[in-house]
Image (spheres, grey):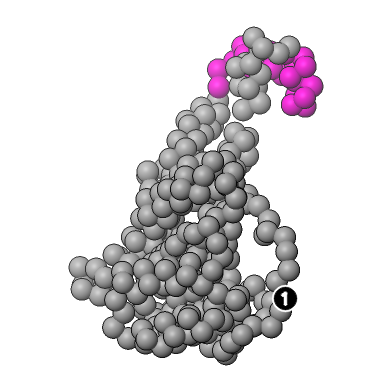
């Protein structure tokens, strides 16, 4: 792969300079040019093209594990270590997000409830337990605040809302969307942190009115709401960090595209057996029907 890089860029840079930077010998490069590629090298080149295509199709966000699963879906025979090696040589890697907005997160909540969920993130059926949280997104207009509701069964985002202020109304709209979309037939446990939006009287009243049960993380313990934190990390790593939004409306449209067009229907989830949330739910329905 390094010899191929030198051959591809020799019109732009000196061969010896590139060999020195890549820590290879010029004599080895010239010998490589005279001899045809080995079968293994030709296979590396072919599969690297497939890996790059799968990476581009994911929006350049997948790491080697999901790329390996994509190759298996295409009927390729390869192991994860091989894909990891090829992605590393090709400069293909997953994106990383940005840090939490600085500020004070202390203070006493106006209303707190027990941590009923207690990190039981794997549930046996849909609409038994949801988690919710709120995060910020930078735009040139200022911050936008995104609230989401996620079903723990499939990790599907069942409700979301984005507003210009970090208010209770933002999280209530996300929860209202979840209730409207899913129409749960039994009582749902809704878990949040102890942010002011989730300790307000309006939030408590909405939960009572819609037959929901509230659960709260312990104070200052982000691991109690790890699924929501993980979703925000993926969103920022795979989409937001790679954009500069001029307006909040532009950010909202891109978040819609990520959630509704990529994350829910397409994005592979390791805990779903490399199925997207929507695919996982459909598969479980078919199993239950004996199809």
- Residue tagged by mark 1? 106
Q: Position of residue 190 (x, y in %)?
A: 46, 80
Q: Nearer the viewer, residue 79 or 36?
A: 79
Q: Position of residue 38 (x, y in %)?
A: 55, 25
When the figure is inspected, residue 258 is found, relative to residue 243, above or below; the finding is: below
When the figure is inspected, residue 38 is found, relative to residue 31, above or below; the finding is: below
Count of marks, rendered view: 1
In the picture, measured across the screen, residue 48 lies left or right of residue 70, that is: right
Residue lying furthest top in this view?
A: 11
Which range is magenta?
Answer: 15-37
Tell me the residue at 73%/64% (across/down).
103
In the picture, measured across the screen, residue 88 lies left or right of residue 116, that is: right
Q: Nearer the viewer, residue 173 or 155?
A: 173
| Magenta highlight on residue 65 | no
Tell me the residue at 71%/13% (across/down).
13
**Residue 172 location, quadrant:** bottom left
Tell me the residue at 66%/18% (across/down).
6
From where the camera sits, is residue 246 visible? yes
| Magenta highlight on residue 26 | yes
Q: Nearer the viewer, residue 102 or 126?
A: 102
**Taken as a whole, is the magenta stretch helix, strand or loop?**
helix
From where the camera sits, is residue 232 visible? no
When the figure is inspected, residue 29 is found, relative to residue 276, above or below; the finding is: above
**Residue 260 location, quadrant:** bottom left
């Amino acid at each position: 792969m390094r010899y191929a890089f030198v051959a591809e860029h020799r019109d732009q840079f000196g061969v010896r300079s590139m060999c020195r930077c890549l820590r290879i010998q010029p004599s080895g490069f010239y010998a490589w040019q005279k001899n045809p590629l080995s079968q293994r090298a030709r296979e590396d080149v072919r599969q690297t093209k497939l890996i790059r295509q799968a990476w581009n199709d994911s929006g350049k966000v997948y790491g080697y594990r999901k790329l390996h699963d994509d190759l298996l879906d295409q009927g390729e025979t390869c192991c994860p270590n091989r894909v990891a090696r090829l992605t590393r040589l090709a400069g293909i890697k997953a994106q990383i997000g940005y840090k939490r907005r600085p500020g004070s997160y202390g203070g006493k909540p106006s209303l707190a409830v027990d941590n009923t969920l207690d990190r039981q993130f794997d549930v046996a059926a849909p609409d038994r337990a949801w988690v919710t949280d709120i995060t910020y997104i930078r735009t040139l207009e200022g911050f936008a605040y995104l609230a989401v509701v996620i079903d723990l069964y499939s990790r599907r985002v069942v409700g979301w809302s984005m507003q210009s202020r970090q208010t209770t109304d933002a999280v209530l709209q996300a929860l209202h969307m979840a209730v409207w979309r899913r129409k749960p037939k039994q009582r749902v446990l809704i878990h949040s942190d102890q942010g002011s939006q989730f300790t307000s009287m309006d939030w408590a009243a909405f939960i009572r009115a819609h037959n929901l049960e509230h659960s709260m993380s312990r104070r200052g313990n982000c691991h109690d709401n790890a699924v929501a934190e993980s979703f925000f990390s993926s969103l920022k790593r795979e989409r937001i960090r790679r954009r500069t939004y001029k307006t909040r409306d532009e950010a909202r449209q891109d978040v819609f595209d990520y959630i509704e067009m990529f994350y829910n229907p397409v994005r592979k989830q390791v805990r779903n057996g490399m199925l997207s949330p929507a695919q996982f739910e459909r598969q479980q329905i078919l199993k239950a029907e004996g199809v």
